[in-house]
Amino acid sequence: MKITIIGTGYVGLVSGACLAELGNTVTCLDVQTEKIAKLKEGIMPIYEPGLDSIVARNAQAGRLFFTDSYAEAIPGADIISIAVGTPSAADGSVDMQYVEAAARDIGSHISEYTVIADKSTVPVGTAENVEAIIRETSGINVDVVSNPEFLREGHAVYDFLHPARIVIGAATEPAKERMLRAYEHVDCPKLTMDRRSAELTKYAANSFLAIKISFINEMAEVAEVLGADIGEVVAGIGSDPRIGKDFLKAGPGWGGSCFPKDVRAMRHLAEQLGISLPVVDAAHKLNQKARVRMAKRLESELGDLTGKKITVLGLAFKGNTDDTRDSAAIEMINYLTNRGAHVIAHDPVAKIAPADLNGYNLSQVSCPYEAAQGSHGIIIATEWEHFRKLDLLKMRRLSSGDILIDTRNLFNVDIAGQAGWKYISIGRKTYEATSGASC
Ligand SMILES: NC(=O)c1ccc[n+]([C@@H]2O[C@H](COP(=O)([O-])OP(=O)(O)OC[C@H]3O[C@@H](n4cnc5c(N)ncnc54)[C@H](O)[C@@H]3O)[C@@H](O)[C@H]2O)c1
């Protein structure tokens, strides 16, 4: 099939490359001409494991193309998939300007019946709105389906090719059949439903996962006070199939480009409908606390942070990605620098562009040991595998202080403590380096 993907970001580029891998002929379109020029040269605009090789293989095989021209990308496509950003607006609603612009541009270039798939995460009712925009602009009969994406950054290629399910919300049989054909070589349940249910499925999924994480973070605080180990508790409850082990990792709260904005959108939607969502609201509130809890803990250990040098290891919202959107690391840096600290950060891949520094007193270095030099306290904010291999004795020798806060529980408590740290992690005992005692 001929498929066009509008928006060549984390979702669009991965979807395009994987749909080409499945045998389709795919054109990826983006309004960022520089991004497209780089992709034509084989340069990836994002860090995503395995993406460069799948893009190269399919481009070479003549199944994957890149363009910044709607006139080139739209005619002749069997399916046009919209994968542009849907960020939060100031009031928590979804900013639909990119989806609507894409719909208008599709409408201006379309000349025959086509299926349009909303892959972006969009409010309930969007498929109907996008259909109306395209039909009004073009005068052509099109079908718009909802085809939400569930991939995880850092595992995106694998997730796209091996999904737990594919959701297709369609209003007509021809549209449903065409979508099923595009995914015929993907071995997973394909759930077909009405469009509104498909759109709500995505928000319900992300809200539920966010609730799971907030719940375990709540339990982690209890474990810290009672001297229990949250990892053991998760093993204990996660082995119950009714609960499951996934998304029960205590940490610095959920972040990234999806959960925060999708939970905000869910809450905003409920407000519009006059429905209260106390469970979702509680998860959101708990998360705001979780994201700065360990920065506050560092402040309580060190006292006044003015002039203190603090090391933050990790900028990305999670390991294996360069995405810093709504990252807990950034929120911690915000908290620390607002209180006068100078933060030295290291992330193996992610960088904060000078334009996005927001006035933070932040330096970024390429080596974790350089980041630790003369530091009064260290926070591990992202679960890069790379950090598990750090030489904690060397870090301790380089550092001026002995506080190591690990929001990702990367180290064994006793080993970190024996390396000379007051090692504070999430939902576990604190190791006091001087006494070997725990509290
Ligand atoms: N990132 C994820 O892990 C993930 C997972 C599932 C779903 N989603 C959803 O997928 C959507 C895309 O997310 P993303 O992270 O890939 O965003 P992104 O910001 O990485 O990419 C969006 C791309 O769309 C392009 N774009 C914007 N307007 C355009 C237009 N009118 N025409 C053509 N291109 C245009 C931008 O230039 C950008 O390259 C969002 O709705 C998001 O919620 C994201």
Image: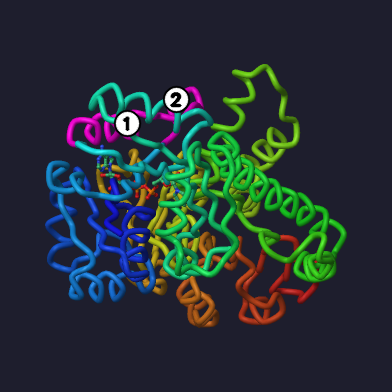
Name the residue rendered at 54%, 65% in the picture: 401
CA separation in Å, label 1 and label 2: 35 Å
Is 216 on the left-hand or right-hand side of 11? right
Q: Badge 2: how crowded within 10 Å, few (<14), some, or many (20+)? A: few
Task: Judge whether residue 103 is colored magenta.
Answer: yes
- The dot on residue 90 is 2
Name the residue rendered at 49%, 70% in the picture: 384
Name the residue that disc number 1 marks: 141
Three-letter amino acid code at disc 2? Answer: Ala
Corner quadrant of residue 39: bottom left
Q: Nearer the viewer, mark 1 or mark 2?
A: 1
Three-letter amino acid code at disc 1? Answer: Asn
Residue 326 shows in the view: no
Range shown magenta:
87-109
Task: Judge whether residue 200 is colored magenta.
Answer: no
Secondary structure, mark 1, is loop
- Where is residue 340 drawn, in percent x and y? 45, 42
Sequence-first disc among 1 and 2: 2
Q: Is residue 77 above or below residue 376?
A: above
User: Could you tell me which quadrant the N terminus lies in?
Assistant: bottom left
Cβ–Cβ under 8 Å for marks 1 and 2: no
- Where is residue 38 drawn, in percent x and y? 15, 60
Q: Is residue 184 above or below residue 124?
A: below
Residue in the foreground of this view, choosing between 58 and 309: 58
- Where is residue 437 drawn, in percent x and y? 80, 72
Residue 96 shows in the view: yes
